[in-house]
Amino acid sequence: MKVDRFEFERALTKRGVARIAGVDEVGRGPLAGPVVAAAVVLPIGWIQHDMPEPLKGLNDSKKLSASTRDLYYSLLIDAPEIDFGIAIVDAAEIDRVNILRATWRAMDNAIAGLQSPPDHVLVDGKPNALLRMPQTAVIRGDSLSYSIAAASVLAKVTRDRLMVRYDSEFPRYGFAAHKGYGTPAHLAAISQHGPCALHRRSFAPLKQPEPDLFNS
């Protein structure tokens, strides 16, 4: 069954909404590194007619190979018709405010990075409580909306490239391979070397147990 990945956008344009931003994040689950969000506004002409041929295969970044993601990333950021913003919230901020609020903040900051504010936001997953503008939460939105899929690719490629760069700064942990996720190799490196500045100290197994005040 063919998916119309402009279904949500077209429904909004029929109501007179002109600027629609797709928003997605990457990096909620890893033990290390930032959470990255992107916001993308595609041209209304594409929404009303069709996606350009080179971008028709755009989909959830997790369903694309690394080389295909890189190709779409280049096409998206080089297209003058596309407005996008990318935001990064680091591990220290994640520990300070918790991962859910950090994710909301990254999305909010990505939207703020657009050249002009959108009229409506399509958010992947659940609603963002920080947004002060009309929004529609779309479960599996990165597979159902071109706008969200574009944001998914920009966020994923940005975060992956950051983790590769961090690998050279903290070579003991293998960040280039696992991107901060809790793989056996990563857990073994943490056990051997302890956490580094990129690790999220509020995440198990890095979180320190609360002191037992009754048995101390």
Image (cartoon, rainbow, N blue to C red):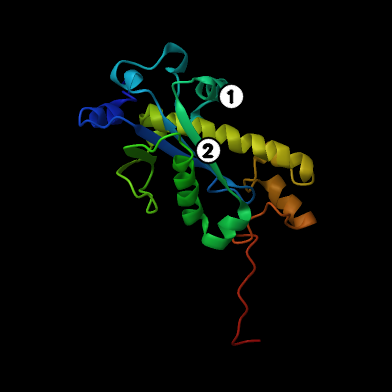
Q: Nearer the viewer, residue 118 or 30?
A: 118
The residue depicted at 55 percent of the width and 48 percent of the height is 29
Amino acid, disc 1: Asp
Determine whether label 1 and label 2 are within 8 Å by CB: no
Number of marks present in the image shown? 2
The label number, if any, that marks residue 215 in the structure image: none
Q: Quadrant of the C terminus?
A: bottom right
The label number, if any, that marks residue 70 in the structure image: 1
- Density class for disc 2 (Cα within 10 Å; few <14, some 14-19, many ≥20) is many
Q: Quadrant of the N terminus?
A: top left
Alpha carbon separation for disc pair 1 and 2: 16 Å
Would residue 203 be visible to someone looking at this image? no
In the rendering, at what x and y percent does residue 26 appear? 52, 41
Left or right position of 43 against 160:
left
Q: Is residue 202 above or below residue 67?
A: below
Q: Is residue 15 above or below residue 27?
A: above
Point out the frontmost of discs 1 and 2: 2
Q: Which residue is mark 2?
A: 86
Amino acid, disc 2: Ile
Would residue 112 be visible to someone looking at this image? yes
Q: Nearer the viewer, residue 169 or 192?
A: 169
Quadrant of res 122? top left
Left or right position of 47 against 215:
left
- Density class for disc 1 (Cα within 10 Å; few <14, some 14-19, many ≥20) is some
The residue depicted at 47 percent of the width and 56 percent of the height is 101
Label located before the other in sequence (1 or 2): 1
Instruction: Give the residue at the far top of this rendering.
Output: 53
In the rendering, at what x and y percent does residue 123 appear? 38, 41
Q: Nearer the viewer, residue 131 or 6?
A: 131
